[in-house]
Amino acid sequence: MITTWDATTPGVMRLPSGRLVRGRGLRHPLPEGERPTFALYLLGKRPPAVGWEHRWLRWPDFWLPSDRAEAVEALREVWERAGSERVEVACGGGRGRTGTALACVAVLDGVPGPEAVAYVREHYASKAVETPWQRRYVSRFP
C-alpha cells in the first residue's frame, strides 16, 4: 500500500480536497526523507533518470507547456495520483513552472481559476507563478 506525503514535508502543498502534492526545484538537493512514488518534471529537455516513476512534460523556463493537451493530461494524472501516492511536481527552480502546474492542479481540485495563483502563493511559495502569461494560463485552465 502506498501512502501520501506527510503534510509537514518541505514543499508539500495541501489542496482543498486534502490531497498533498510536493513542489520542488531540481537545482536544489533532493530533500531528505520519503521519496516520491510519481513525479512530473517540467523542463525544456529530458530530465535525468530517477529511481521512481516519472513523466516529462516539455516546458521551457519562463514559458508555457509546449503541448497544452499533453499538459492537461499530465496535470490530471498528478491530481488523480495525489489521492493515494506521494506525487512531486518539479522544474529547475521550483517556482515558475512548478507554481503554474500546482495552480492548475488546484483548479482541478475545485479552486476557481482566477483564485488559483493566490492559493498556491499562500500554500506553497509566495513567488510561485512568475510571468503574466503563466498567470493567464492558470486563470483559463483547463
Image: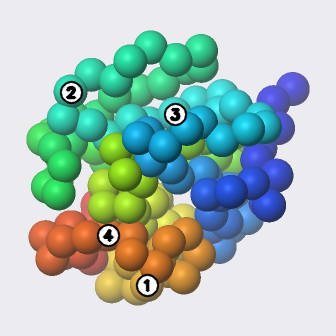
Q: Nearer the viewer, residue 20 or 81?
A: 20
Return the residue at label 3: 39
* Residue 52 horizontal side relative to residue 114, left or right: right
Which residue reaches farthest right?
Answer: 1
Nearer-N-terminus badge (2/1): 2
Q: Position of residue 70 (x, y in %)?
A: 25, 37
Which residue is located at x 44 percent, y 14 percent? 49
Instruction: Report the Cα–Cα distance between label 2 and label 1.
Output: 29 Å
* Residue 27 horizontal side relative to residue 79, left or right: left
- Point out which mark residue 91 bears: none
Q: Is residue 80 visible?
A: no
Q: Position of residue 101 (x, y in %)?
A: 38, 56
Nearer-N-terminus badge (2/4): 2
Q: Position of residue 109 (x, y in %)?
A: 54, 65
Colouring method of the image: rainbow
Return the residue at label 2: 45
Return the residue at label 1: 118
Question: Is residue 61 depicted above or below 15 in this figure?
Answer: above
Nearer-N-terminus badge (1/3): 3
Return the residue at label 4: 129
Q: Residues within 10 Å of mark 4 (few under 14, many from 20)?
A: many
Disc 3, SS: strand
Q: Position of residue 121 (x, y in %)?
A: 47, 78
Identified by mark 4, the residue type is: Val
